[in-house]
Image: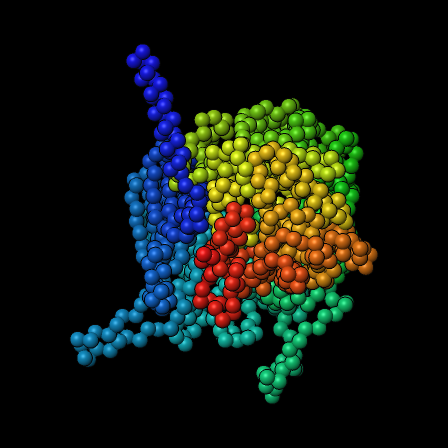
Amino acid sequence: MLRKLSGAMLVLLALTIQGVSAQQKRSLTHDDYDGWESLSSDRITKNGKWVGYMISPQEGDGRLEIIPFQNASKKFIIPRASGWDFSADDSYAVGKISPQEDSVRVLKLKKAKKDEMPKDSLFIYEMASGELEKMANVKSFAIPQEKGSWIAVHFEKEKPVKKDEADSTAKAEKPKKTDGTKLLVRSLDGAKSYEFDRVKSYGFSKNGDFLQYVLAEEDTLDNAAIYLLNLASGQSHLLHEGNTAYERVSFSPQSTYLAFVSTNDSTKAKKPYYDLYLTQTSSPDLEVVATKDSEGILDQSQISSDASIRFSENEKMLFFGVAEDYVDYAYESDTTILDEDRVSLDIWGWQDAEIQPMQLRNKSREQKRAYTASLDLSNGNIAQLEDREVNNVMLENKIERDFGLASTDAPYRRSYSWDIQIGRDLYQVDFKSGEKTLIEENISGYPGLSPEGKYVTWYSSTDSTWFAYDLASKKKIDLTANIPGVVFYDELHDSPSRPGSYGSAGWLAEDTAILIYDRYDIWKIDPKNPEAAVNITAGEGRKQQIEFRRQDLDREERSIDPKSTLYLTAFDEMSKESGLYTGSFSGASPKVILMTPHRYYGLSKAKDSKEITVRRSTYQENPDLYLGDMSLKNLRKASDLNPQQAGIKWGSVELVQYLANDGTPLQGLLFKPENFDATKKYPMMVYFYERNSDGLYSYRTPAPSASTINIPYFVSNDYLVFVPDIKYELGLPGPSAYDCIIPGVQSIVAKGFVDADNMAIQGQSWGGYQVAYLITQTNMFKAAGAGAPVVNMTSAYGGIRWGTGMSRMFQYEQTQSRIGGTLWEKPIYYIENSPLFFMDRVKTPVLIMHNDEDGAVPWYQGIEMFMALKRLNSPAWLLQYNGEDHNLRQRKNRKDLSMRLSQFFDHYLKGAPAPLWMTEGLPAVEKGRTLKYELEK
């Protein structure tokens, strides 16, 4: 009896402790955001022995954590590290150390000068010994990419030595004017070391055999120079001196050559001319290989100092850029005209390929436009590959052939304001001669070369099929149209534009076949016999509604070895579970390795061993880094993000199913507060933007709002949050939103735990438009939040997306706004889908945010909505953040919006007192003096 009593007491005690623990948890506050951590810059050494990653709070000092793969508990932490990497030999970790943010803030409050602010430091950490070395006052550093155990450290400018006040005869030494500072080049173990003064720029060769460095001019002396340091011998060779600039310095892949552009024109010259220089690293002899007058160069052009210099992998070809020559205009050059008398205007011409706002947005890029040319290193011949008609040569990451692809959209560019799916003419270009051969005119899609250069492939949205072009036979091949029972376009596409594809996994070795995705499966297609295509996932993807995609494990992979293991990522479209399978290139059914209710992403394998790292998350589990191998058995958690979450009321999320008004099955996400009680009634927020249900297992970080409600914050504060999916009918974006969102909300209300009298909706941009539309159609919501809402499609149609300079016409005719025609073709559709014309129906209080530098939606749309509601005496507030974009960029403003969103919805849905900014407003005379967060008494 005593034992039974003791057992009962233990159970009671456990339940009591559990209850107390639950009671001790608190809700998220806006003060929690700054300390919430994220993980980034994760790396694994090539030998798989070491792993590192950055942990950063949203505000404050972050840290680098480095661990041995086999023992994650032995963690070495470097506070405030940034910009880090492992050395090429896997022995060291190197990076910067930033000043303490608190110290920087204090100095900013004291209005400290720039040269009084603390500078970055450098760390060198030897993993095997655990030794950490630091260097102060560092501007930048570099290590070789592929081989070598070297580091170059560029220091900040040293402060001038102050005069000795005790010595009346001493004179303070006047520092020489130069942009250069000290460069330290040393082996990572410190055994070898070289120092150079007055260095302006520097860089290693990929294989770590050489380092180039450029000296800056000093005072008025013409002593700028470029040097080459042989790291094996320690000898530094002067390549050239006396010019005013040495730029775009580039090594060839095996470090046989070094090339750069240079000018001897004054640094103040407005029209400097550059020459292209080349040397072999085995010899200090330097040669000018191209000038603006060289044969083969584009007429009326010059060598560009803005274009990068590249080499082919076999080091037989060099690629550089030429720019338009300078043009003198009499009006511009007339020194008798005062600046105040010069005319400033933009002329919009109907014949222009691009409208003026787009031209102005791209002005800097166009001023730096360069046309690619090639130099044959065997004979010095120059060929112009790009010109004013065909100005896009597609150089691959590794240039392995003597030809490539070139394209131009110039014949179709004028239509781009309303047709963003314009075509392009595709050419084959010979890198030695510059000769171009037309492949096809007006293709849609983005063509690419097969690894062996036998084929060009692209997805044609015009035809909804994949094509290959045989370069030898000059034959165009339809790869997918004749495969029965399957389509290769986006099956869920619901806008007036042509649907895109699901992409490709790449080519098998020797160009024997290409792997192309449909919605669920992977197809192996031989261009020589596309009718014999093989579904290498055996149709299991479509059968089980699982999306299979090939997992790439080698970032440098050129083609796919058909003898290698085929790893497949898997995503269950219905349950949202994900994982990994193995497959077969011959078409056997995939075999599951792991399939769990998580989101997996960022899988990275060590280059020379079996070890892997991968991120994993759920709504409740932070996306920590896990260690393991490709079996994914016994994954070990390496990081520990946000342990403070254990003390927060977090909540949960579940997938819900419901029917749209037309009977279409849809899904949504329902977030529930912690300790959810189905017998209670909860206020509910409804947020939407296209489709979101695939993010069931995504972690959502508490963070200040750039535009939308922060779901964890509202859930933690005892709100339900419902996120429904939306499908659209063309021409009916508003009614489509109603037909999907409202039945979704009703299905949740029908469950019995929603306080139907206290529901609100909130959305931004396209979601903001739908909020504005819904409140003209229903009064079921007690409050609404609309960010950057388009309320008048008739005026917005002719507006400009100032972020890109593009006309907004395409958005209505082709993409998200989904009208599917011009304003004069479908005027009724524009009006009936525009909330502004029905604002007299609105009975819902609205909080609008629209900022005066919105680059996507003209901010007068928010004004039109606000003024209509004000005219109708309907409660509305407009938040206009000065100098802000479509979504808030500045953290201070994000914090402000977060506070106002929560105060607004707490007032209407929870009965909390209204803040003074809602009841009194914020008069212009009080702007910047108070925020009016105080609650009404």
Tell me where residue 73 sits by quadrant: top left
For residue 357, say whether it is visible: yes
Residue 62: give x, y in percent of width and height. Answer: 38, 49
Q: Residue at x 70, y 54 (%)?
A: 841
Image quadrant holding the N terminus, namely top left
Residue at the far left: name it. 166
Residue at the far top: name it. 1
For residue 399, say whether it is visible: no
Figure check: 684 above or below 860 = above
Residue 834: give x, y in percent of width and height. Answer: 72, 55
Give the camera-side residue of 7 and 427: 7
Drawn side of residue 583 relative to residue 156, left or right: right
Drawn side of residue 435 relative to residue 139, left or right: right
Give the number of marks.
0
Residue 37: give x, y in percent of width and height. Answer: 42, 45
Image quadrant holding the C terminus, namely bottom left
Figure check: 750 above or below 283 = above
Q: Residue at x 74, y 70 (%)?
A: 349
Residue at the far bottom: name it. 336
Residue 54: give x, y in percent of width and height. Answer: 41, 45
Tell me where residue 303 sits by quadrant: bottom right
Give the camera-side residue of 859 and 628: 859
Drawn side of residue 685 relative to residue 662, left or right: left
Q: Residue at x 49, y 53 (%)?
A: 913
Q: Residue at x 67, y 31 (%)?
A: 521
Figure check: 735 above or below 239 = above
Tell me where residue 847 sits by quadrant: bottom right
Residue at the far front: name it. 937
Scheme by which the image is coloured = rainbow
